[in-house]
Amino acid sequence: MVATLPLELKLVDLSAVQTALQARATRRYEDDREHDNRIKIVAFANGKGGVGKSSTSAAFAVAAARQGARVLLVELDPQGNNAEDLGFVRSDIADDGRAQAAAILNSRPLTPTGSPRKNLFVVPGGDALEEITEELYCQRRLASQTGDTTWLGMYAASLEQVYDDYDLIILDVAPGILVLQLQALVAADVVIVPSKSDPSSRKGLRLITRRFGEALQYNDSLVMLGVVLFAAGSSATRVKKGIRDDLKRDLAGTEVPVFETDIRHVEAVAVEARRRGLVPQELLKEKDLDASLRKSAQDLARDYGALTGEVLQAINQLRESLNEAEEMEEASA
């Protein structure tokens, strides 16, 4: 019989995370009291890959930055697609996720590695995020024995330390990693779900709504802002109704909007945009763009522009409704 020795793992000390989460709770309380709800952390997430999540995150980040917002884009994904989408693969900005891993594993601020566009700052993903996921799964296992759920706020704690530095913080979340998705949803103010209309994509959409429900236990301010249909065809109206019905079932009747703007998928434009490290809005302005791609690039750029306006309007409307509700509650007290 082979003797086994207990293995003791040294996990991250979560005391700094607790302090930062307490600071977040205080900041949210003060915002409520002043009727000044700030909604700035937006998570793009789906339970399935290949639904336009990273493309939409990057295009939205660039569009918001061009409108003058100071934007932080954090990629919670080992694939590191943002480097290709924004064209910094071969620059010092691309660090394979090392800065992100160092921040999360040491409870430090999520500091950007650089700025690939004016007003846009990035914390890239990459292989180094495997260190984070290993830590998170160990913390999750320990929490199942102790009941201490502080580990769920590790990203929220690092983001709280830079919260006031940006107008908008965008989280591009890996599709298949449970612990990273929970981290993003606990940290976020709102979540947007890009989805295609095929059965597999809609299964991923239902999965992320269930995780949304889990995250609400630890982040009761989280709001599902809406679903973005990616690569939707002529049946978009019927598909939207089907998605609404599915979401109502998954969320026990809660109404979740589907954005009016659909994002079409044009493979040739997507390939050319990524090859140049540009989002469609930028690709359209390239003078040497092949004439055969220009019309499709123009249509796609228009989609992303419309979606950006719709999302920012939805955020403003949510902020106003929350502030009005608090004012009415205070007046009736």
Image: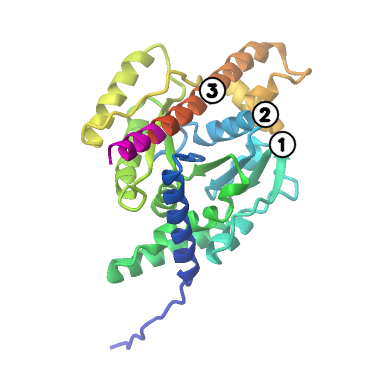
Residue identifier under label 1: 117
Question: Of callouts 2 and 1, which one flags the residue occurring earlier in the amino acid sequence?
Answer: 2
Q: Nearer the viewer, mark 2 or mark 1?
A: 2
Give the residue at x 63% y 24%: 280
Q: Which x, y percent locates residue 161?
A: 56, 56
Frontmost residue, 181 versus 161: 161
Q: With respect to residue 36, does 110 lie above or below?
A: below
Give the residue at x 47% y 65%: 19
In contact (CB < 8 Å): disc 2 and disc 1: yes
- Classify the position of the N terminus by image quarter: bottom left
Residue identifier under label 3: 309
Q: Residue 59 lies in what quarter of the image?
A: top right
Q: Which x, y percent locates residue 298?
A: 63, 14
Residue identifier under label 2: 66
Element assignment for label 3: helix
Q: Nearer the viewer, mark 3 or mark 1?
A: 3
In the image, what residue type sits under mark 3?
Answer: Gly
In the image, what residue type sits under mark 2?
Answer: Arg
Q: Residue 26 lies in what quarter of the image?
A: bottom left
Describe residue 132's horizontal placement relative to residue 7 as left or right: right
Q: Residues within 10 Å of mark 2 (few under 14, many from 20)?
A: some
State which region is magenta.
323-333
Q: Residues within 10 Å of mark 1 (few under 14, many from 20)?
A: some
Q: Which x, y percent locates residue 317?
A: 44, 27
In the image, what residue type sits under mark 1?
Answer: Arg
- Classify the position of the C terminus by image quarter: top left
In contact (CB < 8 Å): disc 3 and disc 1: no
